[in-house]
Amino acid sequence: MRIHCPLCGARDRREFSYKGAALVRPLAAAESEAWHAYVNLRENPAGPLAELWYHEMGCGSWLQVTRDTVNHTVSEVVLARDAALGAGV
Amino acid sequence: MRFSGWRVLKEGLTGNRGWGPQWRDPEPKREYDVVIIGGGGHGLATAYYLAAEHGIINIAVLEKGYLGGGNVGRNTTIVRANYYLPGNSEFYSHSLRLWEGLEQELNYNAMMSQRGMINLFHNDGQRDAIVRRGNAIINQGDDAELLDQDAVRRLVPYLNFDNNRFPIMGGLLQRRAGTARHDAVAWGFARGADMRGVDLIQNCEVTGIDVEGGRVTGVQTARGPIRAKKVALAAAGRSSQVAALAGLTLPIESHVLQAFVTEGIKPLVDHVVTFAEGHLYISQSDKGGLVFGSYLDFYSSYAARGNLPMVEHTMETCLAMVPAISKARLLRSWGGIMDMTPDGSPIIDHSPIAGLYLNCGWCYGGFKATPGSGNAYAHLIATDRPHGAAAKFRLDRFSTGHGLMDEEGTGAQHNLH
Ligand SMILES: Cc1cc2nc3c(=O)[nH]c(=O)nc-3n(C[C@H](O)[C@H](O)[C@H](O)COP(=O)(O)OP(=O)(O)OC[C@H]3O[C@@H](n4cnc5c(N)ncnc54)[C@H](O)[C@@H]3O)c2cc1C
Ligand SMILES: [Zn+2]
């Protein structure tokens, strides 16, 4: 599996480490239910999933990668910064 | 049909013409008291214990493929009771005791082999952790023995003791741990359930769960609708998808775990041995193949096969620990889909929907749980009260934060357990 880093180009999966589903982080003051959903609950689809990967052995960027969990086809990669996941819910 | 030595002898002398099918292949009825979704180890064991211990026999087990085609037939077959945290500790202890009487109870040869398991340690920190774990195991009433390097050498001389990075300092031995033939466990429970009247229905994918007024009323399947008073999930790696049919979101991510087997070689590995550096477990099957595995692939996956970097990693670790097998050829490798929870421990509980029960989150340790899980889940379904040995496997521990059982201490990250 290869991931196309927007800064470094196509790189082997071994250069990256995995965080999990890319979810919008709740605001610090959000209800505990929102935090529970963020920390624990997962849609866990068999199909396309937006997730966070870290280009650990490359440029050190966090990426939002859209990957099919059945056949590992990567359809989109953007910098996590641009995915605005810290916006709060 | 009862199996016995006498029967095997008689059939052997008469051309083996007297063996019949070991379970029926019934058409689904329109209604059952209990419908179990998933004909893996846990679903089949649940059906067996519901019938054998609670007298509930109007049950269907609905399996989308064939019985035992899921993880129960894909694992590395290790059975043990060496957990550390309360909750897990008493449950796996209960399960191991059930394993010990299982073959007599089912009248089925599950090739249960208590060959002993040795968890190696390679540095002082690991030694301290293993001593602490050993004490917890003994307090629970199970067996654990601390071995120094010489004692490990006497038992498993073929290891690379003087590995510069990961010298083997000693190990923790659990003599009652071992392996069982995974398919036979599924078949034994299937036969036991069928003999008591349970309908085992294969090629029957559940495609919908019917809920009316907050109570479950039945399921939609590839073989038509089936009504049910109670519906029990036992779909392992597919738990999230089955729960979604009832509108539920679970604290589960699905990940692939791989397993490997070499060509058959002469007897070498008499125990189950686990290495703490690089994480690897190895045993030898009765056919002679070395069976081993290591980590998850690390990213969520529904592909029932693994990635090559993990194959390479596993081979490297294996050869670092057992250089002697470098010339053995790898025959096969495969993967299975694991239902990973944020604390690495399972769930056996009610769901928010009346009459719908959850059994999931077994991660990569659910084979040894098979009898215990079926036994405890049957108790919950029949009595609506948790079984004493599984009372801490609650769904709400994730939302409340009370009673989390994070054996690895890695925090709320599904792929790290
Ligand atoms: C490579 C590997 C090694 C492992 N090693 C060990 C080990 O050494 N020790 C250990 O204790 N555990 C081990 N495990 C874990 C263990 O195998 C699992 O935790 C356990 O088997 C899961 O429970 P099960 O047997 O009920 O699952 P499964 O056998 O997967 O049963 C679930 C069933 O549900 C069915 N299903 C799914 N969706 C539907 C639907 N919609 N309708 C109808 N049916 C459906 C599936 O087809 C499947 O047959 C390992 C797993 C793997 C993959
Ligand atoms: Zn990069």
Image (cartoon, coloured by chain):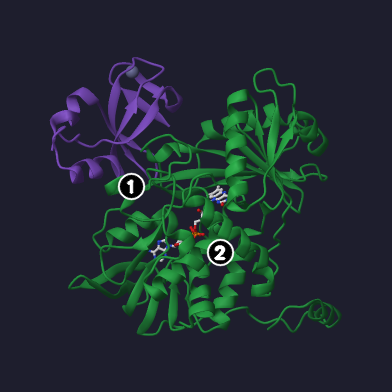
Mark 2 falls on what kind of element?
Answer: helix
- B171 with respect to B335 (left or right): right
The image shows residue B136 at horizontal and vertical percentages of: 57, 44
The image shows residue A85 at horizontal and vertical percentages of: 19, 31
Question: Could you tell me which residue is drawn at 41 percent across and 81 percent down?
Answer: B28
Q: Which residue is mark 2?
A: B371
The image shows residue B1 at horizontal and vertical percentages of: 68, 84
Between circles 2 and 1, the one closer to the viewer is 1
Question: Could you tell me which residue is drawn at 17 percent across and 73 percent down?
Answer: B213
Q: Which residue is mark 1?
A: B402
Taking B55 as reference, is B414 above or below it? Answer: above
Q: Which chain is purple?
A: A
Quadrant in which residue B187 is drawn? bottom right
The image shows residue B11 at horizontal and vertical percentages of: 80, 80
Which one is earlier in the sequence, the residue at label 2 or at label 1?
Answer: 2
Q: Is mark 2 within 8 Å of ligand 1?
A: no
Taking B112 as reference, is B122 above or below it? Answer: above
- Looking at the rendered structure, the kind of residue marked 2 is Pro
Q: Mark 2–mark 1 contact, CB under 8 Å?
A: no
